[in-house]
């Protein structure tokens, strides 16, 4: 059986970097390490980090002074940095540099008197974090339909940024509508290409092989998107770990492609590859 792996599969650059930084911190046991919310949405990975000593909390108040807190790859607002400093909690900042760049844009324009618009999902932690760099004053737009019910200030200057995972077509649709409404707006396309590249690699591989295995959380929306893309092109198995694979069923295929969602660690992918190679 030939096993092929999609060019871009699993962790993106930012998540890979964050998970490595978190792992390095846990190697140092001098003080306790906390994270504000689960590091990623993958229960196998989170429990592995918890076994190494990571404590997951929702609020910074729950962290004692002089311990360490990991800021996740999708970042947090300015207030968290201030609260940590006030409490003498040491920050381990794993915010993705692409998200950091958005924080800086928002903060710079906000200080210059611009009103901020974020294209994205209001409740997503990344958007909550971005909004925290303009004192939570941003207008958050998720769909083009929402624009009609927003009262814009015709005399104000606006700066528009986007959540990194927004769909480009959706972004462009919203931007072109905003351009017709706002008199003075600076548009910053801050979408990260990692998600799109992962989907494109999965699509290309699915065209070449007899079946695809998509590894990732059952509740991970980006994994489910990969499953749907592959299903349209070939036989597809969606799994969380190798234990869900059936040797007898897979024996019927000459070539198998593998891809994985954004929160699937390399070691889970490697286990699947090893399993396939043993057939
Ligand atoms: Fe990943 Fe950073 Fe892009 S976390 S999706 S590389 S913004």
Image (spheres, rainbow, N blue to C red):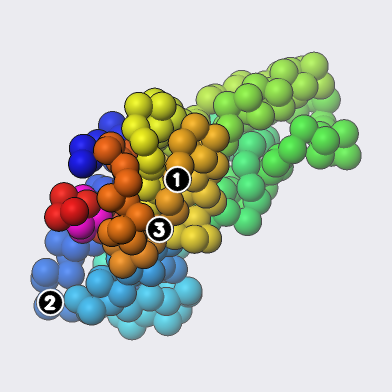
- Range of magenta residues: 271-275
- Is residue 171 in view? yes
| Residue sitting nearer the eye, 216 or 186 | 216
From the image, tell me which residue sits under label 1.
Answer: 236
Real-space Cα separation, disc 2 to disc 1, in angstroms: 43 Å
Relative to 18, is 176 on the left or the right? right
Q: Position of residue 154 (x, y in %)?
A: 83, 25
N-terminal-most mark, 2 or 1: 2
Question: Which mark is in front, 2 or 1?
Answer: 1
N-terminal-most mark, 3 or 2: 2
> In this rendering, is residue 23 above or below 181?
below
- Is residue 74 in view? no
| Local crowd size for mark 1, using a 10 Å CA cut-off: few (<14), some (14–19), many (≥20) | many
The numbered mark at residue 239 is 3
**Mark 2, secondary structure of its residue:** loop
Residue at the spot 21% in from the left edge and 37% down from the top edge:
2
**Mark 1, secondary structure of its residue:** strand
| Local crowd size for mark 2, using a 10 Å CA cut-off: few (<14), some (14–19), many (≥20) | few
The numbered mark at residue 29 is 2
Contact? badges 2 and 1 (CB < 8 Å): no
Real-space Cα separation, disc 1 to disc 3, in angstroms: 10 Å
Question: Which mark is in front, 3 or 2?
Answer: 3
**Quadrant the N terminus occupies:** top left
Residue at the spot 49% in from the left edge and 45% down from the top edge:
227
Q: Position of residue 198 (x, y in %)?
A: 39, 35
> In this rendering, is residue 140 above or below 76?
above
Residue 278 is covered by the magenta coloring: no
Real-space Cα separation, disc 3 to disc 2, in angstroms: 34 Å
Predominant SS along the magenta part: helix
Residue at the spot 49% in from the left edge and 61% down from the top edge:
218
């Amino acid at each position: 059986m030939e096993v092929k792996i999609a060019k871009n599969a699993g962790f993106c650059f930012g998540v890979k970097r964050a998970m490595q930084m978190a792992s390095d911190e846990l190697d140092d046991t001098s003080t306790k390490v906390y994270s504000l919310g689960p590091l990623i949405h993958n229960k196998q990975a989170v429990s592995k980090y918890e076994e190494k000593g990571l404590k997951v909390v929702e609020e910074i108040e729950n962290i004692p002074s002089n311990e360490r807190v990991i800021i996740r790859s999708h970042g947090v607002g300015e207030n968290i940095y201030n609260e940590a400093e006030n409490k003498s909690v040491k920050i381990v900042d794993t915010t993705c540099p692409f998200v950091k760049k958005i924080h800086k844009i928002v903060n710079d324009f906000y200080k210059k008197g611009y009103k901020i618009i974020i294209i994205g999902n209001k409740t997503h932690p990344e958007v909550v974090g971005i909004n925290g760099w303009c004192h939570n004053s941003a207008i958050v737009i998720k769909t083009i339909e929402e624009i009609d019910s927003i009262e814009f200030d015709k005399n104000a200057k606006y700066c528009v940024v986007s959540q990194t995972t927004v769909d480009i077509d959706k972004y462009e649709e919203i931007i072109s509508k905003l351009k017709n409404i706002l008199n003075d707006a600076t548009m910053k396309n801050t979408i990260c290409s990692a998600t799109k590249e992962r989907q494109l690699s999965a699509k290309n591989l699915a065209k070449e092989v007899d079946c695809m295995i998509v590894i990732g959380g059952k509740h991970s929306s980006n994994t489910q998107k990969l499953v749907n893309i592959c299903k349209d092109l070939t036989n597809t198995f969606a799994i969380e770990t190798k234990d869900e694979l059936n040797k007898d069923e897979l024996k019927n295929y000459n070539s198998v492609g593998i891809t994985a969602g954004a929160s699937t660690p390399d070691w889970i992918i490697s286990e699947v590859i090893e399993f396939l190679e043993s057939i």
